[in-house]
Image (cartoon, rainbow, N blue to C red):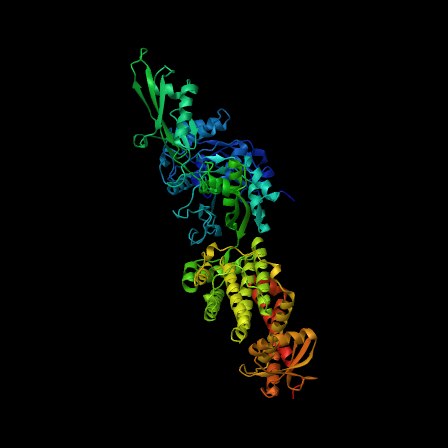
Amino acid sequence: GNEVLRETRDYISIATTRPETMLGDGAVAVNPRDERYAPIVGKLCEIPVGPKEHRRLIPIITDPYPDPEFGSGAVKITGAHDFNDYEVAKRGGIPMYRLMDTRGAMRDDGAPYTEAADLAMAVAKGERELGEAECDTINLVPDDLRGLDRFEARKRVVEQITSEGLAVMTTGDDERLGKSAADPEGGDKRVPLVEAKKIMQPFGDRSKVVIEPMLTDQWFVDAEKIVGPAIDSVRDGTVQILPEQDKKVYFNWLENIEPWCISRQLWWGHQIPVWYGPDGERFCAENFELAVEAAEEHYLALNEDSALGEALGESILQYDSVSVSALDEADTMAVGTETSGRKFPQSSVSSFMSGGDDGGYADITVYLARDPDVLDTWFSSGLWPIGTLGWPEETDELKKYFPTSVLVTGFDIIFFWVARMMMMQYAVVEKHPFDTVYVHALVRDEKGKKMSKSLGNVLDPLDLVDEYGADAVRFTLASMAAMGRDLKLSTQRIAGYRNFGTKLWNAASYGDFKGTFALPHADAPPAPTLAITKWILGELAKTRQAVDEALEAFRFNDAANALYAFVWGTFCDRYLEFTKPVLDGDDAAQADETRATYAWAFDQCLILLHPFMPFITEELWGMKQRPKMLAHADWPTYGTEMIDAQADQEINWTIQLIDNIRSARQQVNVPASAKVTLATVAADDASRAALSANTALVERIARIGDFTDLAEAPKGALAVTAPGATFAVPVADLIDVAAERGRLEKSLGKLDKELGGLRGRLNNPKFRESAPDEVVEETEAQLAAKEEEHAKISAALANLRDAA
């Protein structure tokens, strides 16, 4: 549109959260697309702090980093004290002047400010060039600010800028100042614009103070040169990462990798294996002895023109012998050179007169100083797969166990640890460190929230073990470990699996009572003749296959749930009850077979459960004489050869009949102690044969008092079905049919209302969009449970449709 304002300025405005770092600015950057500053790009501007007669000038440059829409669009570049500024400085060739030491105080070393400022001016005008190391020696902190704490220096810098009228000013009622800084009386009073706004800044997790970015000398690995094999091995399937979704994190980090800083200034860790000679020469070696060999070669053959001669103050550069020793720390730590805020011991050289004809020194002792830094923890632990097996020696363990098989780890250290182990093993021994990486989920609370002390929802595993037992906690976590999904842990679920352990213990007690623990240990199953023996062996074989398939696919939850279903539902609830009529019967041969089968099948339950519940299973295993501990037992390999199709069909038919009778009785409140009549209305030959062979089971478990055949179901009878057969259970004499029908109809009406409400919520798009995921999931689970209950009550009403 029309031009409404034109202004001529002799300044460029910048904003900063750390005014003291202006002293080390190397440039002011603006975006190349910002037309406002196009006429002044390449010009010099003055830093508004420091002695007036020695104010530095720095260039105005362009770089994509500044955002034209944020603030003034101009950004000060302090390459030595900001990560983003460092990148801009590298791209633009801007000098990086360090202002602080490792104490967080302004530097007080080096030449006087006037000399340093003159040198920096020459660099800004293009009259001098500085290397990175030389630039680091220049101290641009004015003399009156040297040695001050950074926060105190910050106050002084703001005061100096304001006193000279160089701060951006605003009125006292400016809302950007915040309540504490704004003039309570408002008005036109002019104050410096110091915005009250929250910023992101890092704090040390131990020191609790602000971490100051600062350019320092560090050791780096040029990771880009060694990362290729680590990427390729996952892409071509040599190494599997499960679940697949976690490959994204792995590839994202490796494909965008930057030089890796591997040095740390800590008191603990593996010290970097680098030694320094008196002339600054570095010797990198596995140990001091190898560094000595390298140093001897260096000083004897390669160092005629080095600083060694200067250090001795002699002109003779040929020596009869050189001995290399470790640095005596007590003699040298008091002497140090300040390098990027780090103290390095200065190597000392001792010489001894040998009485040579030339009057020179014949024997020289050279002391080596080791770098005081330690390796980054992730660098050290990155060598874990081989370091634990004796590398760098070619040990038998290394040959046998490397590469390892499966690494189990958390998603939060995929790039910290997994990726580093991969690239380091390839770089060092040229092999992948493991075949598979299984990334486990995060354990959350029962509502899906991350556990936090502040929220008060932390479940301490040690407390859970004390209350419920280690096996219950372990099995709970395994049963919920669905690949790629976080675990929602609740104490109710752990309590349920504690009951599972109790169920297992009760099954052992029953077997002991029936004499199974008196039998000798058997590795092979008994030869089956009875249908229930053939059936339980087949069910065990199916479970073993399901568990193995799940474990091979790292579906630990499927393996745990398959075992839970078999041990509790099939073995303890079904088979244990099926053995009672036989063990209490008169046929000794059948009882002996059943007793031996129970003993062997129970042993297999312990073996299969041992990885999930190691303590209780080992305890129960030890209740009888064994050739070895359960932990050393062989994993079973039996399979389909143990499945008998005919016995499987017969017993499963019997189970379905028993379940349907018990369910029908329960729905209409037939007393549990009452024995009922089971009338066969229609049945094929297979059904009659199955019922005849298992009459004792049906009679005992379903509480049947009499068996009969009828042409049709009488009134007041419950209809019960099984594959190929229809039965009737008369109940008119046992219950008030009319009252039961009324109760069921009332329950059905109540359920209809509840189902309508749940379906309405779930069919509402706003509910699904706004409600938390755990609330939606809980509502869906409630709906499924209510629908199942509705179906059962409807079936019970249908059973009473012809009742009087």
Foreground: 134 or 785? 785
- Quarter of the rendering containing residue 745: bottom right
Q: Is residue 396 above or below residue 246?
A: above
Q: Percent from the top left, x then y, of residue 658? A: 60, 75
Up the image or down, 623 lies above or below 653; here it is above
Q: Can you say whether 257 is above or below 455 in the image?
A: above
At horizontal 59% and vertical 35% (from top left) the residue drawn is: 38
Q: In the image, residue 291 lies at what x, y percent?
A: 41, 28
Residue at figure coordinates x 30%, y 32% from the top left: 330
* Quadrant containing the N terminus in the rendered view: top right
- Point out residue 86 in the picture as x, y percentages from the top left corner: 50, 37
**Depth check: 504 or 526 in front?**
526
User: Quadrant location of residue 361?
Assistant: top left
The C terminus: image quadrant = bottom right
Closer to the camera, 595 or 83? 595
Residue 69 appears in the rendering: no
> How many numbered discs sit on the rendered protein?
0
Residue 712 on image: x %, y % = 70, 84
Nearer to us in this view, 152 or 494: 494
Tell me if I can see residue 235 in this picture: yes
- 423 to the left or right of 158: right
Q: Is residue 209 above or below residue 766?
A: above
